Image: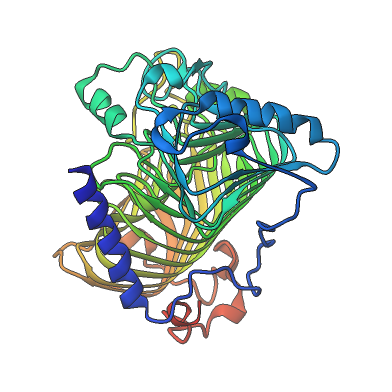
């Protein structure tokens, strides 16, 4: 069954590639984010086989990974080192990375997560969450883990990291977990992180989770999990700044990218926002989440998010802001443009009733501030609902701006809005009453990232990125 699911997902990938014509799955030199130096030469290099690892998919190699990295730590102040994982199927439990390390996977190398929960140690909950996301108490540590690191590269020649998450999904569905499920890759309190040129499969929980990090690049990765796999988010920047995500294909059971910053009173107290997040050239789909989501854990604040050249198909929702009473925090200065949608249930959604709370000590009067959200240049075919935009009574979401949006909608009620204030221009079908006031000529300054020179922008660039990427 698992093989069949992966085959279906791979067929989806091939269909997208066929649709997109001339897309080249490489990072071009014209990319505006700093390039990932994935082939940077480290002065010291060892292969995992030198530490007794066996790539037969059966032998547990946790000790080999731990011993190799312990050895390479002696070179961290000598220019760093590379751990090479050759072709093979390398079963392992959780292991730690170190600073100034490149973890390199060969083309036919597969790192496999153990299906024994004892191989995933339990660690303390994140301070900005106060408890495990799923259960009170601790959480299982990610398969590939690191904290307080500098200059870490996880890359290769399109090797694979497979969490073998089906056993975890079954435990979750049967409610037999003792602790929150592990992520596939988690880096904490780290800076100078690059993750590139790899395929990630079947994460037990969120796939790539940089938390309390800065200067993070995720480029040219493929992330796959079955559409019914619970909470298998793709990339979740969490209380992190200066994050660049480019040239990725993601097909999972939940949000493709979810930007977070802590949960209720714990996130408010920890007070580390996610800011300066760039997302470019993202393709993907899901049936139970969103293409790009902000929240719902956003209590430390989220701001300065720039996302462009997005293509979502056969999906539940394209763009979502999730929050609730008790979250506090803010979401502001969000700019999303050049979006193509095919077969999406809801194009834009603001959900203010996302109400799970960590405990009973949250402050119900802690209201989120949602403001200066601009969404521009969107086309969509076979869309059920254009927008479900719902703020909070007594906490109106302000300066929501929609510009140059053309959707073919099947619903008789394309927009449903409440407690929303903003402006629009060139939106079809016609938007809801709270957004009908025109952006031009008087309100371009009220809309984040819009100015007078954008008035003439139309469909001239729409979709062109698909054929020039």
Seen in the picture, residue 136 relative to 287 is either above or below; the reply is: above
The scheme the figure's colours follow is rainbow
Place residue 207 in its image quadrant: top left
Q: Residue, x 49% and y 31% (percent of image)?
A: 143
Residue 362 in picture, x, y percent from top left: 45, 19
Question: Quadrant where the N terminus lies?
Answer: top left
Q: Residue, x 49% and y 49% (percent of image)?
A: 87
Residue 314 in picture, x, y percent from top left: 24, 61
Place residue 204 in its image quadrant: top left
Q: Nearer the viewer, residue 312 or 320?
A: 312
In this rendering, does residue 325 appear at all? no
Position of 367 with respect to 316 (left or right) is right
In this rendering, does residue 271 appear at all? yes
Position of 240 with respect to 468 (left or right) is right
Question: Across the whole image, how many numbered discs are drawn on residues?
Answer: 0
Residue 15 in picture, x, y percent from top left: 28, 70
Seen in the picture, residue 226 relative to 412 is either above or below; the reply is: above
Residue 86 in picture, x, y percent from top left: 54, 47
Q: Residue furthest right?
A: 78
Q: Residue, x 74% and y 42% (percent of image)?
A: 81
Q: Nearer the viewer, residue 361 or 133?
A: 133
């Amino acid at each position: 069954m698992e093989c069949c699911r992966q085959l279906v997902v791979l067929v989806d990938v091939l269909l997208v590639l066929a649709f997109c014509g001339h897309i080249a799955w490489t990072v071009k030199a014209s990319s505006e984010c700093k390039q990932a130096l994935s082939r940077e030469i480290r002065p010291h290099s060892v292969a995992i086989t030198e530490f007794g690892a066996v790539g037969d998919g059966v032998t547990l190699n946790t000790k080999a990974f731990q011993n190799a990295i312990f050895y390479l730590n002696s070179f961290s102040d000598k220019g760093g080192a590379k751990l090479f994982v050759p072709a093979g199927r390398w079963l392992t439990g959780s292991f730690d990375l170190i600073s100034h390390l490149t973890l390199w996977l060969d083309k036919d190398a597969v790192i496999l997560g153990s299906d024994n929960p004892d191989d995933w140690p339990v660690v303390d909950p994140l301070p900005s969450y106060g408890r495990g996301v799923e259960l009170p108490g601790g959480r299982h540590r990610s398969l590939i883990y690191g904290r307080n690191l500098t200059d870490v590269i996880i890359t290769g020649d399109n090797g694979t990291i497979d969490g073998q998450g089906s056993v975890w999904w079954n435990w979750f569905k049967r409610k037999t977990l003792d602790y929150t499920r592990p992520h596939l890759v988690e880096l904490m309190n780290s800076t100078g992180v690059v993750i590139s040129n790899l395929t990630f499969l079947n994460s037990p929980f969120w796939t790539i989770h940089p938390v309390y990090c800065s200067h993070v690049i995720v480029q040219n990765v493929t992330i796959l999990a079955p559409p019914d796999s619970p909470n298998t988010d793709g990339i979740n920047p969490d209380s992190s700044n200066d994050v660049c995500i480019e040239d990725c294909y993601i097909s999972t059971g939940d949000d493709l990218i979810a930007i977070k910053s802590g949960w209720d009173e714990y996130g408010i107290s920890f007070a580390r926002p996610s800011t300066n997040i760039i997302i470019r050239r993202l393709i993907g789909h899901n049936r139970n989440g969103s293409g790009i989501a902000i929240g719902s854990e956003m209590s430390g604040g989220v701001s300065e998010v720039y996302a462009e050249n997005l293509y979502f198909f056969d999906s539940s929702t394209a763009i979502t802001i999730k929050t609730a009473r008790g979250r506090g925090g803010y979401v502001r200065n969000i700019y999303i443009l050049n979006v193509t949608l095919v077969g999406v249930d809801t194009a834009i959604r603001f959900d203010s009733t996302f109400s799970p709370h960590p405990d009973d000590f949250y402050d119900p009067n802690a209201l989120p501030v949602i403001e200066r959200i601009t969404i521009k240049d969107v086309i969509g075919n076979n869309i059920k609902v254009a927008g479900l935009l719902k703020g909070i009574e007594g906490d109106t979401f302000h300066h929501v701006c929609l510009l140059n949006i053309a959707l073919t909608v099947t619903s008789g009620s394309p927009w449903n809005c409440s407690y929303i204030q903003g402006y629009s221009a060139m939106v079809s079908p016609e938007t809801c009453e709270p957004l009908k006031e025109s952006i031009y000529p008087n309100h371009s300054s009220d809309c984040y990232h819009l100015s007078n020179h954008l008035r003439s922008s139309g469909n001239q660039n729409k979709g062109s990125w698909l054929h020039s990427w």
